[in-house]
Image (cartoon, rainbow, N blue to C red):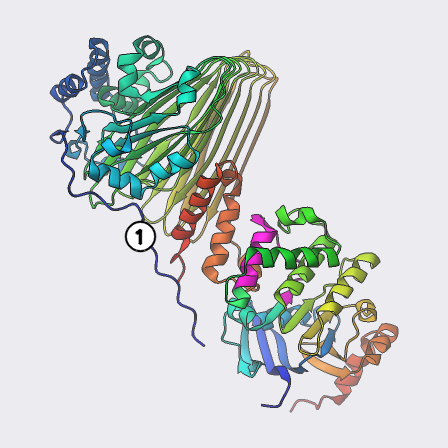
Amino acid sequence: MSKPQLAPKEDYKYGFHDEDIINVFKSEKGLTRRLIEAMSAMKKEPEWMLKIRIKALEVYQSKPMPTWGNVQLLSELDFNNIHYYVRPNEKTEKDWKDVPEGVKRTFDRLGIPEAERKFLAGVTAQYESEVVYHSIREDLTKQGVIFLGMDDAVKQYPDIVKKYFGRVIPTADNKFAALNTAVWSGGSFIYVPKNTNVEIPLQAYFRINSENMGQFERTLIITDEGSTVHYIEGCTAPTYSSDSLHSAVVELVALPGSKIRYTTIQNWSNNVYNLVTKRAVCYADAAVEWIDGNIGSKLTMKYPAVYLMGKGARGEVLSIAYAGKGQHQDAGAKMVHVAPHTTSTILSKSISRDGGRTSYRGLLRVEKGAEHCKASVRCDALLLDEASRSDTYPTMEINEKNVAVGHEATVSKIGDEQMFYLMSRGLKENDAQSLIVNGFIEPFVRELPMEYAVELNRLMQLEMEGSIG
Amino acid sequence: MEENILLRIEDLHANVEGKPILKGVNLTIRDGEVHAIMGPNGSGKSTLSNVLMGHPKYAVTQGKIFFKGEDISGLSVDERARKGLFLAFQYPLAIPGVPVSKFLRMSLQAVRGKEVPIIEFRNSFKKNLELLGINDSFTGRYINEGFSGGEKKRHEILQLALLEPSLAILDETDSGLDIDALKVVSEGITRYRTEKRSILLITHYQRILNYVQPDFIHVLAGGRVIKSGGKELAAELESKGYDWVLKESEAATPAKI
């Protein structure tokens, strides 16, 4: 009897691209002031936003590249070989049938309209640089919930945007935040009025289609006192032999007693650099939860942060990272306790295989006066083979005595004994391994809406296939 | 091939990390038979069960294992399981995050080689839970995670009952059980037994043999079966210990040339 054949490794399912797209505008490669002026004009933006952009461009150009993280991979990205602005359409549509045929076909393949019908309260679909489709359930609009593409929000709600834009993540925060501020396009804007619960998730889906594309969406979410929202984002891109860049900025403002849950399933193709800044401010008795899944991309550098500004505020980051061949997931979390009686939890899980690399990079800071706060950090890494690597870089700055801080980090390998146990029940090597991996990420998966949990488990299954032998 | 032979072990030698443990084991089990292997600590009992199941840490250096007429010593662990071999573990491992029900359904589909409808699975699962006196909450728990010693053993027998293998190797299933748990587990084993299904019971103590009646008892020592007999042998071992068998065996072994 011969050994059973393992299923061949399935390709990245989302690696297709559309050939027949006619863009309204596609910028030459490289980033210039002229391009920023041109895109701002095309967007018919107010003058104040253009000013923010121009200033940000200067900051971006003056800041050096990071000297930490994967410096080698960062140095390989050619910033002059990127299209910084690609406009696939004239305006955001409210009906899928008005979305250009090729673009619509892509979103159909990605299952977005179907998901929308089944279990979402609103959808933003971004293709290249622009939001091509946007919808929100009428009852939410009636309750005063605003959910728009960011570009439309700048025009329709300039007062709210001006008040919060760049306040959580200032332009000069880091090089890539400055880059995004200069050339941002698309993304979501959400405002939930006082004491309003948006019970069904709102979703954004980001799709890159062109080769050497740069996507720079900008998202701002504000929950007013006592309100809640759950926002989900997903992203994919075609597989190309040369690099693309995705550099988003996401700012969250949770006003007293409100709650934001922000879920990300990042599944970029393995030629995308994913350099993202995400940060929340969380006021008294408010809660912010980042549920952050990183499966794809070549290099991800992303450390969702929560600043706990008011008594009783609570922050949570629950993340998984998966790194296969040629991938480096440099991810983590930041928690800053500014106010007393605040709580934070970080649970980070990573899986590396086939020479993939994961890093946990985290910051826990307790400021002077932030008494009686509680913080816990836990990182678990699972290595599937000898060639893979995982590192932990936890930073703790505790400036107050009366606090409870816990930290735990584990690195494990899939044990022979566990494999023996499962295989002795008839499970093939691959199935046994993916069962163990799925079990490892279960604390993350169980926080996802069911449809996403199923999808994520299936994704991991595909990643595991062909990983042995 | 002689009829009704389920397992035939011929002159089996095996190493663990280069160290010889089994030094020529011979054993034949026919359909429906219950064999008990007893022996002092370190005699190779657990090695034998691991080698039969195909644990990669153990290397067969000589001899053959015929199961249903086929030499299985080259087969992988899962292939052996799908052929109808089962090992109830002495120390079942926890696998965090993997729900028992998911694992059991996957296992059942693997050994049957086909889809098992969820309804059919649930019914069979529920029935067996009741028979083994296992709480319903078990379904949502993770494999062996936070299980008490008794729960782990019941979980092993639950798997045995569901998967219905042709040969169940029970590796010290009785160890660590109080008398009530031992009774429930033994009943589970007895229920499993039919004229087609056989059991290889590995134990240090005679206690379980009061509940699961063996047809044959073998004494394993120094990596070989040094004495075989009927169930009366258990009582003799219990009262006299292993020493007399060991001495008898030494006397019978021809001096090395």
Q: Is residue A397 visible?
A: yes
Q: Residue B123, relative to residue B194: is it above or below? A: above
Residue at the spot 39% in from the left edge and 18% down from the top edge: A141
Q: Residue B148, relative to residue A35: is it above or below? A: below
Looking at the image, residue A90 sits to the left or right of residue B185; the answer is left
The location of residue B143, given as percent across then percent down, is: 61, 51
Residue position marked by numbered label 1 in the rendering: A11
Looking at the image, residue A275 sits to the left or right of residue B171; the answer is left
Q: Chain of mark 1?
A: A
Q: Is residue A298 visible?
A: no
The location of residue B32, given as percent across then percent down, is: 70, 79
In this view of the protein, which residue sits in the foreground, A301 or A266?
A: A266
The location of residue A65, given as percent across then percent down, is: 26, 27
The N terminus of chain B - image quarter:
bottom right
Part of the protein shown in magenta? B87-109
Q: Inspect the magenta stretch and tell me whether residue B137 lies in it.
A: no
Q: Residue B126, relative to residue A60: is it above or below? A: below
The location of residue A177, given as percent across then percent down, is: 30, 22
Label 1 element class: loop
